[in-house]
Structure formats: C-alpha cells, structure tokens
Amino acid sequence: MSRPGLRARVTAAFAVGALLLAALMALFSYDLTRRSLLDERERTAVRAAYYDAAVVRSGLDTGTPDVVAVLRSLDTGSARRPLLHLRDGWYARTADVGASSVPAELQRVVADGRPAVQRIRLDGQPTLLVGVPLPGELGYYELTSLREVEDTFQVVGLALTAVAIMIAGAGAALGWYATRHSLRPLTAVADAAERIAAGDFATRLDPTTDPDLTRLSSSFNEMVDKLVRRIDRDRRFAADVSHELRSPLQTLAAAASVLTRRREHQDERTATAAGLVADEVARFQRLVDDLIQLARTEQPAHRETVDVVDLARSACRERSLPESLVEVSAGAPHRWWVDRRRFAQVLLNLLENAERYGGGPVAVRLGAEDGVGVLEVDDDGPGVPAADREAIFDRFVRGRAAHARAGTDGTGLGLALVAQHAAAHGGTAAVLDRDRGARFRVELPGAVR
C-alpha cells in the first residue's frame, strides 16, 4: 500500500485538527447550553410551584375545602401537573399522577419541612419534580415536563454536529489551499529538475521568488552549473580523444586494408590474423564515430522542413532493406519539422539495432498524434525484457539479446544516440511490447504542423 503524499497528509491533518477543535467547542457549547436551559427551567418551575403552593394553602384555609376544586383552580397549563399530600391521602387533578410519582426520599425531605427539587422520568419522559412543604405537615408537589427542553437539546446537538462537520470540511479546504501554495516552490523545483533531465540545461530557479527558499534556489542553481560544467568537460574530452584517435585509426585502417588485399600471398594463420585486425580496426572506427556523434548530441537541434518518408526509404536503401518496410499512417504528413542529420541518424541506428539484435526490421512506421511526430521500428527478435527497457538507452549498455549474440560487434552507443537525438527535439525514446519482437518508438513534439 503506497503512502499518501505530503499534500494529502497535511490536508488530512488540517481536517482532523479542525474536527477535534470543533468537537471540543461543540461539546463545551452543548454542555453550557444544557446547564443554562436546565437551570433556567428549574428556577422557573420552583417559582411557579411556590406560587401555586400559596394558592393551594389559601384554598385550604376555608372551613370545608374542596381539595380537587382547589387544584383545578391552578393555572398550570399542560406542562405542569399538581399533586397534594394531606393527612388523609394524595390528591391530583388527573388519575395518571399519584404517590408513586414522588420518590420516597423526596417525600421525607418535604415532610421534614424542607423544599426539594429532583429530575425524574415519568412514563418515559423527563420531568422536574418540585416539593414545597405546607403548614400542618402537608406537602405540595408539582411535576413539570422537560420534554420541550430535551427537544431543544436535540436540535442544539444536531446543529453543533453539523457545524463541526462543516468546520472539518473548511479545515480540509484550508489545508489543501495552504499546501498547494506552500508546495508551489517545491513544484517549481521538481519541474526544473524534469526539464534538466530532459536536456534543458539552461533551466534555473529564481532566487527572489520566495525569501525563505533563497538558499534552496541558490544551491539548486549552483548544482546545475556544476553539472553543466562537468558534462561539458566530459563532452569535450570524448570529442578531443575521438578526434585524436582518428588519425592513427586511419593509418591502421589503411595498413589493414593492404594486408586484406594481399591475403592470397599469406599463409593461413597470417591471413586469419590480418582479418581479425581489419575487423577490430573497423569496430574501433565505428566506436570513435559514435563517440563523436554522442559529443555532438549536446548541441541544440537545427530544425528544418524534412521529407521524413523519403529519408526513411533512403535509410532502408542504405542498409540494403526493402523500401516497402516504410509505412505512413493515414493522414500523417510526409514533411516534418526536425533536424535532418539527427533524424537520419535515429533511423539508421534503429535499423542497425534491429538487424544486429532483433532478427531484422519488419516495419518502419511514421505517424502523427496531436502535433507529435511518431517513429516506430518493429523487429522480429526475442523482444526486450521489462527490466532492460530503460537501461538499454544508456551509454555503453547492451541488452540481454545483445549479450546472447556474442558474435555482434556493437558499441553499446546506438540506442543512447537515439535517446539523445530524441531529447534534443524535446522528445523521448522507448521500447514497447509486441506479439513477437520489439517495437522501438520515438516521439518528437512539434515535428508535425
């Protein structure tokens, strides 16, 4: 399982942090609201109970009081229900309220002459019970429904939960926005690194973009400068050595040619040795030529309008291959905006690679996709293992198919040159799967207009 990216982790951290903070604030607000509402309802219920108790006491001071009539005279509304305890029993306005509604402990407190308040559940509903002592060891009780208050608590809880969720979402959005802007300089560094890897060594970072990243930008630019100087030194060294080797190689090639022409006057061992010398000198010459070509690939591409179809057919003729191998996709133009010398070198190297290691080329395709010129060369060989598909475009690297054919005399620079020429056009070189053999694909952006 892959680890989430930095932006995802920071966004999640903002969301979780906002959710925790919102949850704490919601719990605090809910508890404070609940306490305030319950305390206010309790004070209101106690005041109403004392007032109603005074009315009941006045009604009982008559000679022959009608207790039920006195209780019914109270203006308690639907939320409050009175209950009176006299010496001869309990009295209420309705049958659903009786002595069982009052806890025994609260009855003892009121009987001792002290008022009492207790929250109970009556018929499954929250109820506030207020007990008021009356003279003569009498007790007046009033039950106030808290159903409305509980409904208010539910509404408040839902509202606070919704607010917490919205705050968490806002925190996630803030985290995403913050990381997007804070990571923008790092994105610029990554983009610059990609352009440099593609061969654009003129890319640099602006140290004045972000004062906090001045050191990073300066260090990055210094690293690129050193890399460019190192590449230039290596390129000049390879070019200088290759040019210096050309003169003695030409002398050796001329001497080997003389020996080869006089093979009929030599004994068998001498003729064999002369043939080996001539082959190795020819291979050495190809290596030097490839090194010189590789040194030249660091230069920018000089684009011009080129008939690539004619160029592909010429490359086939040069390799003694049938021109019928060249195929042009429907609608693809014949003239591309490319460097003629580089494109011709790409064609020749891919054809040579197919002949040496791929059993020979079977198709050379030219096409276009959204302004990108596409060149594909199919061979009839064993294909390229997935583990080798990137490495074979490195310098002096030969794939497993090349090692399996020990008789081949490749230099390991042909596909590296292909990749370098493609990069000079801002493009790429890759090898793809086929049912049989390999398909080498070169993409050149801006080649088709």
Image (tube, helix red, strand yellow):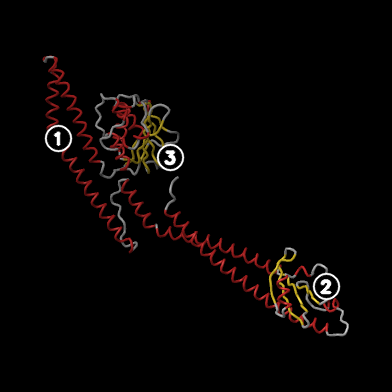
Q: Answer whether residue 314 is visible to the viewer in this image.
A: no
Residue 273 position within the rendered picture, expressed as x and y whole percent measured from the top left: 14, 20
Judge whether 14 appears above or below 301 on screen.
Answer: below
**Pointer 3 or 2: first along the chain:** 2
Residue bearing mark 2: 93
In this view, which residue lies farthest toward the right? 64
Q: Which mark is drawn over residue 185?
A: none
Taking the image as shown, residue 23 lies to the left or right of residue 255, namely right
| Residue 223 in view in this figure | yes
Name the N-terminal-most of marks 3 and 1: 1
Secondary element type, mark 2:
loop
* Crowdedness near tag 3: few (<14), some (14–19) or many (≥20) residues, C-alpha within 10 Å: few
- Which of the two marks, 1 or 2, is nearer to us in this view? 2
In this rendering, is residue 46 above or below 103? below
Amino acid type indicated by mark 1: Leu
Residue type, numbered disc 2: Arg
Q: Which residue is mark 3?
A: 369
The residue pinned by badge 1 equals 245
Residue 349 on image: x %, y %: 29, 32
Q: Amino acid at mark 3?
A: Glu
- At 34% from the left edge and 62% from the top edge, which residue is drawn? 210
Indicate whether 365 appears above or below 271: below
Give the total of numbered labels: 3
